Image (cartoon, rainbow, N blue to C red):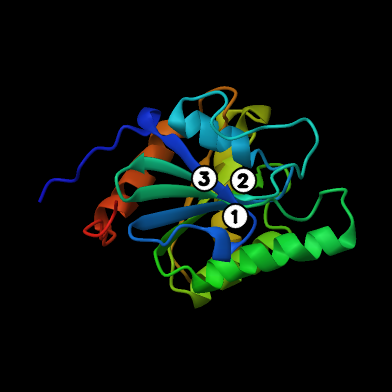
Amino acid sequence: MQTEKLDFRKTKFVTSAPDIKALPRGNGAEIAIIGRSNSGKSSSINAICDQKTLAKTSRTPGRTRLINLFEVAKGKVLVDLPGYGYAQVPENMKRQWQKAMSDYLQKRDCLGGLVLTMDIRTPLRDHDRMIIDWSIAANLPCLILLTKADKFGINKRREIIGEVKTALSEFGGNFTIIAFSALKKIGIDEARAVLNNWFSMMHTDDSDEE
């Protein structure tokens, strides 16, 4: 069976929600994108979808406070989760974000894969490792985008990818690691190919969609 090639440029915003209770019922397949607030998460989504303002970016890290859904095709959705680990906001708000993310990751039945953005200069920080541990426990594939890869030349990028692979070998799990730059368009085709493959393998049920 030939894999359908998705056109990520046609991705459109669906809705935002403060928590999983406010999300529409998940009938299709969802891939969640998560990362530190200053890891270039929103820029990565925009680059993959070739749209400058699809996911809202900000000079102030931590501005993504809602769960945002973007439909790539019918029944195939990218989910932008709030950033973690940096936002200069009150502790009670951080706890609300953390609960919203935890509930989504643990309870959203249609979740089929995880994209983790990490700054290539500071990969595998504590919160990143927690997300990786969770992806393994949930038996979900994890695509790691080493963002801001334009800060290094190709040889250094390969060296860092090797170091991250070695560090992840202790975890086990199903990981794909890509050097990525939204600015210089590095790794975009590779990331699209992974996401396309994941969506093609996921079960979707749109029989009762309106």
Q: Is residue 27 above or below residue 33?
A: below
For marks 1 and 2, give the CA distance.
6 Å
Q: Residue at x 51, y 77 (%)?
A: 137
Residue 64, how many percent across, how many down? Answer: 69, 44
- Is disc 3 surrounded by few (<14), some (14 to 19) or many (20+) residues within 10 Å? some
CB within 8 Å, label 2 to label 3: no
- Numbered circle sitting on residue 164: 1
Mark 3: secondary structure: strand
Q: Left of 203 or right of it: where is 86? A: right
Mark 2: secondary structure: helix
Q: Is residue 194 above or below residue 167?
A: above
CB within 8 Å, label 1 to label 2: yes
- Is disc 2 surrounded by few (<14), some (14 to 19) or many (20+) residues within 10 Å? some
Q: Considering only order in the chain, which callout, 3 or 1, is on the residue closer to the N terminus?
A: 3
- Numbered circle sitting on residue 160: 2
- Is disc 1 surrounded by few (<14), some (14 to 19) or many (20+) residues within 10 Å? some
Q: Residue furthest left?
A: 1
Residue 86, how many percent across, how many down? Answer: 81, 50
Q: Amino acid at mark 2?
A: Ile
Q: Which residue is mark 3?
A: 15
Q: Residue at x 33, y 57 (%)?
A: 28
Q: Amino acid at mark 3?
A: Thr
Mark 1: secondary structure: helix
- Numbered circle sitting on residue 114: none
